Every structure is written in structure tokens, then in C-alpha cells.
Image: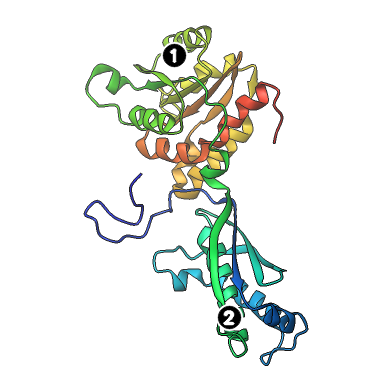
Amino acid sequence: MGFTHLDSSGNVAMVDVSGKPGTMRSARASGYIVMQPETVELLSRDALPKGNVLTTAKIAGIMAAKNTAHLVPLCHQLNLSWADIVFDVGHDRISIVATVKTQEATGVEMEALTAVSVAALTIYDMCKAVDKSMEIGGIRLEEKTGGKHSVTAGYRPRTSILVLSDSISSGSAVDRSGKVLREGFEAAGCPVGEVRVLADNRDEIAAVVDEWVSEGVELIVTSGGTGLGPRDVTVDALLPKFSRKLPGIEQALFSWGQGKIKTAMLSRLAAGMVGSTLVICLPGSVGAAKDSLEVLVPAVFHAFAMMKGEGHS
């Protein structure tokens, strides 16, 4: 993996997260400050010259979490939902744990690490008058959840992609959305068996889906044929086959698409089960393919754990 904060020319660049959906994300970081046992004893009795050390350090750490983007140049400015710091006072050290949460498009590990760092520095500042031997260390990320990192493990379905387009099928246009979808699902760990291009023909669409279902393909993603034109027949061909509709997937795709382009409301997205195969019908544009990957991957993979009886956790 390359450095995300460098562009193709090697110049420093902020990561563009405008194409990612906001989700619940959290991070927990830890560290410690070592000091003389006598300093710990004074701190525990609030007997240090500058007053209540841990209360001040907690406030400082929370403020630092909220201002991380002003301290670390390429961090995104995030609206934090919650931040907290807990101290464990030992014989010769104080352990620090910071937890931060947000509902944004990128993670909060830097906010948690900054909170620990500034809390430790505040303790140092408030105790330095009586202890010149203090040492800060062990600052590290303990846990990060949310976004794609929260569901990195787990089952990955056998996948095939069906591109519906008269122009691509005839050779007068080049498939781009199918390529994007293949690369996206393969990057997520899915074995992608085939990307097939068909003209907008109801019978052929239904036949290919039946073929793949019979072959044990577990996830079928179609691209194209979801609009209002007379040749947009993908949804019409597949809806009658659904034994179960999955409106949650449809709503998530609709919501994300309409948040970026108003004409997304005109697409007839569809998702449902054909036997034990999950079928998702997407618009045919490259932008729609990229947006759909942001919404679906990796959350949709949990459907296969549910179908195998593994529950919702």
C-alpha cells in the first residue's frame, strides 16, 4: 500500500473523502507518563502547586481531540460525537486511554492519539515543578472501528457482474462501469468469476441470471438498465424473480446517490434474493458504480453471514 497523503507526483496532498458515506467510527488510543512515586502520591492528594492535575489533563485531551485538524496539517476537520479520557494511577506511572467517536466519512484515530498526547503533556506541565525525571511513552492506537476497517474479515461471496447496454454490446462503446465494479469487489476480497455484457433484452437478462444462480454464484451485480427509457428493462426483468426484496439496500443506495446528484431519484434501483443468490441492480454510469461500492462494500457481505445463520453481530 502506498502513502495516502502523497499524490501521483509525490507531492503532499490531503485525502479526498467527499465520495465516502458518513458512518459511525470510533478509535481508542493509549499511552503513559512515568514519574517518581512521590510525585504520584502528591498528584493523588491534589497537593501539587498547579492544582487538580487529572481533571485539567482530561479537559486538555478532549479539547485536543476536537482541534486535531488544526494541529496535524492533513487531518480532516471532523464533527466529533463523543470523546473521553480515562486515567489509571499506578505506583510510578499514569496510564492514559482516550476514546473518540464520530459519524463522519473518515476515521478518528488521529484525534484519539492527539488526545492521549496532549493529556500526557498537560500532566508533565503540571508536575514538572516537582519532578524533572518524567517520561512520556507507549502512545499507540489500540482499536479502530467503523468504515471499511470494521468489517475487513469474514465471508466473501462468489460474484459475477452483468453489464446491460445496447451500445457496449454492439461494440460502439467501451465498458467502464463493469471494470470499476470488478476491481472494487476484487479489492474487497470477492472472487469475481465473470463480467458479461448484454444488450438490453429482458429474456437474455433473465436467462443469464438463472444460469449464474444455477452455477452457485452468490452475488450478482447488474449495471445499467435502471432508468426510464424504453430500453431500460433490467429491473422489469428481475423483479418477478425476487423471492425477497431488500429495501434497506435500495434505500441506502438511493440516499447516497441523491445526496450527490439530484437526478439519482430517477433511477429504479432494486435488490433482492433469487433463491440463495443476492442480486443488486445498479445504474450504468461509472460514477454510480463507484458510489455503490462505497455504500455496499463491505457492509453487504454481512448478508451472507446472516443467510448462514451466524446472526447480526
Q: Is residue 54 left or right of residue 284?
A: right
Q: Residue at x 47, y 48 (%)?
A: 20
Q: Is residue 58 left or right of residue 44?
A: left
For the residue marked with disc 1, what is the amino acid? Ile
Q: Position of residue 80 (x, y in %)?
A: 59, 64
Q: Position of residue 63 (x, y in %)?
A: 59, 75
Question: Label 2: which residue?
Answer: 124
Work out whether 126 lies above or below 202.
below
Q: Is residue 40 left or right of residue 80?
A: right
For the residue marked with disc 2, what is the amino acid? Tyr
Q: Would you call the spot at circle 2 few (<14 residues within 10 Å), some (14-19), or many (20 or more)?
A: many
Q: Position of residue 176 (x, y in %)?
A: 31, 31
Of residues 198 and 150, the one nearer the viewer is 150
Question: Label 1: which residue?
Answer: 205
Q: Position of residue 174 (x, y in %)?
A: 25, 27
Q: Residue at x 48, y 34 (%)?
A: 267
Of residues 243 and 130, the one nearer the viewer is 130
Q: Which mark is residue 287?
A: none
Q: Say which of marks 1 and 2 sits in front.
A: 2
> Quadrant of residue 242 in the image?
top right
Q: Residue at x 58, y 74 (%)?
A: 120
Work out whether 283 lies above or below 26.
above
Of residues 266 and 183, the one nearer the viewer is 183
Of residues 117 and 277, the one nearer the viewer is 117
Farthest residue, direction bottom: 49
Tell me the quadrant of the picture where the C terminus can be found. top right
Tell me the quadrant of the picture where the N terminus can be found. top left
Q: Earlier in the sequence, mark 1 or mark 2?
A: 2
